[in-house]
Every structure is written in C-alpha cells, then in structure tokens.
Image (tube, coloured by chain):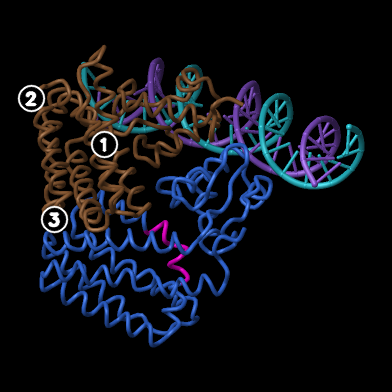
Chain colours: A blue, B brown, C cyan, D purple
Amino acid sequence: MATNDEKNNLVNLAYVALKRDITEGVYRPGDKLLMRGLKERYEIGSGPMREALSRLVSEHLVTAISQRGFRVASMSIEELTDIYFARAHLEAMITELAVKLGDESWEAGVIASTHTLSKVTQLNSAEDMLGLWDARHKAFHLAIAQGCGSAKLLELRLTMLDQVERYRQLWLRHTVFSAEALEAKREEHRQLVEVLLSRDHVKARDMMFEHMTGPVSIISEIIEARGLAEHE
Amino acid sequence: MATNDEKNNLVNLAYVALKRDITEGVYRPGDKLLMRGLKERYEIGSGPMREALSRLVSEHLVTAISQRGFRVASMSIEELTDIYFARAHLEAMITELAVKLGDESWEAGVIASTHTLSKVTQLNSAEDMLGLWDARHKAFHLAIAQGCGSAKLLELRLTMLDQVERYRQLWLRHTVFSAEALEAKREEHRQLVEVLLSRDHVKARDMMFEHMTGPVSIISEIIEARGLAEHE
DNA sequence: TTTTAACAAAATATCTACATTTTTGGTTTC
DNA sequence: GAAACCAAAAATGTAGATATTTTGTTAAAA
C-alpha cells in the first residue's frame, strides 16, 4: 500500500487542485466555472466535480446559483476589510486565551517556531523563499494559537484563514520581496513573543489585533491598482 | 412561478430534509448513513445525495471516510464542552463589539425582539410553544449580535450555532417545559438587556459569556442519562 | 477447542455515460 | 424598440458499470 493515508478519491484530488488553482489565480474572481472545462482539466465526471465545487462553496471560495452553475467568488475591498476585521478579533481573542492558559510546552512551541521562522534566508529561487517563509509564518501563528486549548476555536481560525487566503497572498509577495517590510515583520514578531511570554494578556490581545489588521491598507492598494475587485 | 425564490433543486431539498432528520434524532449520532436507504427516503440518485451529504460534512454534522461512506457525527461530552466554550467566547466578543458599535436601530431591534420573546405563552400544543419560543429566542440573540456590524462575524456565529444545534435541542426541551427554568431565563435576558443598553461593554461581555455556558451542565447530564455519547 | 488465515460472496461506495431540464443568446415578428 | 420564439449551451439528474470494503465460511495452525 502506497502513501495514501486517508482520502484519495477523485473528488479530493479535484478539490485540492481547483482550490490551488483559485488561490493561485488560474481562475480569477468572478470567472464562470464551466463544467465542460473543469471536467477536462481535472479529468473527472460531472458528479464528483460538482461535489468538489460544493465543498469550495461551503468555504466561500466559489459561489453557486441553482441552475446557473458556479463562479469563482468575487473579491472586494468591503470583503477584505470585513474579513480582516473579523479575523483580527478572533485571533486576538484566541491569543488572549493562549496567554492565559498556555503551559510550558506552549511556550516551547512558540519559541521554537519563532526561531525556525527567523532562519529563513535567501534560497535558490525567490519563489522557494516565498513558500518557505509563508509556511513557517503560518506555523508560528499556529503555535501561538494552539495555547488556547480549544479545538473548535482553532477550527474557526482555520476557516477564516482559508477565506482570507486569496487576499493574504497579495500581501505575502509584497512583504517577503521587500527586505524592509520583512525586517519590520520580524521586529513585530519579536515584540509579540516578548509580550506573550510576559503573560500580559491584555497587551498581547491588543498587539495581535494590530498585527492582524496591518496588511489591510497594503492589500487594498494592490487590489485597486490591479482592478481585482468586483469586475462586472 | 411559485414561491421558489432561490435554490430549489433536489440537492437542496435532500440537504434540508436530512439536516432536519439528524438534528431531530431520526438518525442518531454514529449511525451509518447507507446510500441505499437515503436514496429511497429522499427519492434522489446517489450523485445529488452525495452532494447533500458533502455539505453536512462541512458543517460537521456528518463525517465521511473515503470508500467507507458517511455516518452521523458522534456526540460527546468533550465536544459539548469545547463547542460551548468556543461559542461562548465568540458570542461574548460579538456582544462586546455590539455594545461598543451598535446604533439606535440596533437598540430598537433588541428591545423589540425582547418584547416579542416575552409574549410567548402556552399555545395549542406544547410542541408549537417549543418551536415558537426557540425561534424568538434565536431572533433575540441575533438582534443583539447584529450590532457588531461584521457580516463575517455573524457568519462565524451561524457556523457555531449549526454545530451546536443537536446539543442545544436537548437543553431546549428541558428549559421550555419547565416554568421555573423558563422564568430564570426570562430574568437573565432582562438583566442582559439592561446591561446592553447601559453600554457597559465589559459587563455585557462577561454576562453573555455566563449566559452561554449555563446550559452545559444540564446538557451534560441529559447526554449521560440517555447514553447518547460515543456509543461504541 | 480456539485462534488465525485465506478466500469468496455480498454489500456498499464511487464513478462514468448519457438523458432530461433549464438557461442563454440570437433572430424574428409585431 | 420590445416581446416572442427557437436553437445551442449548460446544468442537473438517473441508471448502471466498476472498484472497494465488509462479512461469512472454511481450513490450517496453535
């Protein structure tokens, strides 16, 4: 038996592939997703394809109208603002809990992932560097959040992360490819960890909220510049 | 054209019907959901049925294992505790925001729904009374939450409400059918509204958190008494 | 006798191909 | 210019083929 641990049916493969294609911009916001094309691209029948689409609908990456098929969910400044507002509040709340409840192994995890993140330097390609920094940055924030001790809260957090992903990708390139921006983030993280370990939950909460809302203005500009929002 | 406004395809009908059947206990936690039976009961082919199941999976009401079909998600004291913990924190946070940001029309909405809820009295059948109180109680809490001004937060809130529904149903019968418990809730609501309107967001936050966690011990007892949890 | 292993049959899940229904977009008619 | 119509395109649904898992049986090993 190969390395297929859990779910390896066609629906899953199509789901993962389409999700990637949407977040990577192969299909752009508002694009119509024609069955014909999808079937061809993912080599799958309509039934399973619909199921995969269905999942993305529940993640708000795709919208569906009965009898009129599927579209890539549109992006807008309004959604950007709201989603980051909600996410920042959620993350801040989780952070407060983590500071209150986190034990020694939580602290260890935070410190370890901070270190790992700080070690990302120029690699073969800039693209590799992007991927690695992103992965470790996510791991860093996850390590913090895990201290809250609630599986459901962590799940909610993931929901938001999924929904924000397309917007976040825009910010990511901006940040990672600017030595200046990257250094600023590094410093923010350093201060954040300091406060976390000092167990000042009010300060930690506020700081995390600020940390999470920072990207909004940058992303806003990029969206307007590229005309990504609400194209008729 | 009839009253069908939006989505009236077979998938939706099956989704709604199955969801109701699960929350109402027609299918019990852990039950295997056989395609054969489902197809028959909801008069639908496997394709659409899978799609409906798929949606319930994303709402955590059903679990799926590749090649082994679907089951009603199990219930457990652990999940009950975690889900109410997460929900209480979320609702408390939203309440705090609502108190900070809610405008006059928000206040009006809260007062109106408080009044409407208080007017529920004995009806034809006890079952009718249950449904009406539940609907108005939900409307009351929604009216409060809407003050937060964030569509995404309200959406997260609904996610949690869906996930908690099976547990909440247990509490509902216990509360509505006991004049004593019902009166206690009424008083809690009265105090809650008082604090909301006084704009004391810290107190409102804490009070909402308490209000939301109250049912846990009651539900816990019911689950143990009925042996609903994790049946082998 | 009890346990383990091997296998075959039945039940079940998954997928494809095609049939049906609905929408879309262009053309004609008033 | 608006309404009515029609054909092409697309979405939705069904039936049945294929693949996988489960179950029951038998026989060998402990």
User: On what subunit does the disc labeled 3 rest?
Assistant: B
**A171 in relation to C13, above or below:** below
Q: x, y percentage for residue B61?
A: 34, 35
- Dot placed on the residue nearer the N-terminal end, 1 or 2: 1
Res C4 quadrant in image = top left
x and y, in percent, of residue B186 in the image: 13, 32
Is residue B55 toward the left or the right of residue B43 in the image? left
Give the amino acid at mark 3: Asp
Q: How many angstroms separate mark 1 from mark 2 (CA)?
A: 22 Å
Closest to the observer, B23 or A36 = B23
Name the chain letter of the residue that bears numbered label 2. Answer: B
- Mark nearer the N terminus (1 vs 3): 1
Q: Depth check: B75 or B118 in front?
A: B118
Magenta residue span:
A161-170
Q: Is residue D27 left or right of residue B211?
A: right
Question: What is the secondary structure assignment of the residue under circle 1?
Answer: helix
State the residue at coordinates (20%, 73%).
A111
Where, by quadrant of the figure, is residue A10 drawn? Answer: top right
Residue that label 1 marks: B113
Q: Which residue is mark 3?
A: B200
Name the amino acid type tagged 1: Ser
**Residue B72 colored in magenta in the image:** no
